[in-house]
């Protein structure tokens, strides 16, 4: 893996060549917390798809607020959220062993 396939956001290194999934508004990549070496999933949302007052933007805001409050062994853990000029990055627990469906 070359350095061009990696991107650093805060304390997380994203492997841009290891896409885990994709939806209508986001792509999910494999990442690593560089401090703890814990593997994580990093959901990247393009801000241009979240126009003001849109359903997508409202849903995104709700997702962040709800995930911050949820604590259960049966729910993917929410760790952090970062933003840059163009994207939001949601840091989540990595669920190995298949899709969430």
Image: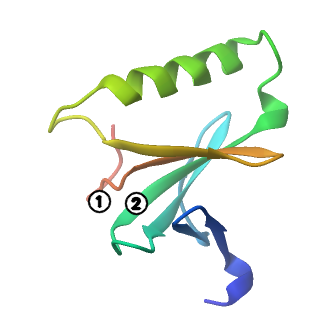
Give the color scheme: rainbow, by chain, secondary structure or one colour.
Answer: rainbow
Q: Find residue 9 and report its horizontal and vertical position in percent.
A: 62, 62
Reading the image, the residue beneath label 2 is: 40
Residue at 35% across, 56% down: 94
Residue placed most toward the observer, 17 or 70: 70
- The quadrant in which residue 8 appears is bottom right
Q: Quadrant of the C terminus?
A: top left
Judge whether 88 appears above or below 12 on screen. Answer: above
Instruction: Please tell me which residue is depicted at 50% across the width and 27% down the height of the picture.
Output: 64
Would you say the residues marked 1 and 2 are in contact, meaning their CB atoms lie under 8 Å apart?
no
Instruction: Report the residue at 49% width, 64% height from top.
Output: 30
Q: Closer to the N terminus: mark 1 or mark 2? A: 2
The residue carrying pointer 2 sits among few (fewer than 14), some (14 to 19) or many (20 or more) residues within 10 Å by Cα, namely: many
Q: Which residue lies most toward the left here?
A: 73
Label 1: state its secondary structure: loop
Quarter containing the N terminus: bottom right
The spot of residue 20 in percent (x, y) is: 50, 58
Residue 81 coordinates in the image, percent (x, y): 54, 43
Q: How many marks?
A: 2
Task: Give the CA separation, mark 1 to mark 2.
Answer: 10 Å
Query: Which residue has dot 1 on it?
Result: 96
Residue 33, labelled with which disc?
Answer: none
In front of the other: 73 or 33: 33
Instruction: Determine the image quadrant of residue 16.
Output: bottom right
Q: Residue at x 67, y 70 (%)?
A: 7
The answer to whether residue 70 is left or right of residue 50 is: left
Compared with 41, 72 (above or below) is above
Please give left or right for residue 11 compared with residue 75 in the image: right
Q: Looking at this view, is 42 or 83 the one in front?
A: 83
Element marked by disc 2: strand
Q: Position of residue 49 (x, y in %)?
A: 80, 31
Q: Is residue 28 left or right of residue 49?
A: left
């Amino acid at each position: 893996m070359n350095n061009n396939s990696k991107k650093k956001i805060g304390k997380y290194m994203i492997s841009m060549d290891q896409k885990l999934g994709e939806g209508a508004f986001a792509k999910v990549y494999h990442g690593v917390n560089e401090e703890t070496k814990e593997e994580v999933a990093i959901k990247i949302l393009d801000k241009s798809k979240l126009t003001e007052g849109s359903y997508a933007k409202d849903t995104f805001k709700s997702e962040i607020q709800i995930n911050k409050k949820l604590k259960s062994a049966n729910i993917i853990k929410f760790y952090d959220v970062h933003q840059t000029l163009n994207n939001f990055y949601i840091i989540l627990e990595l669920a190995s062993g298949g899709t969430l469906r």
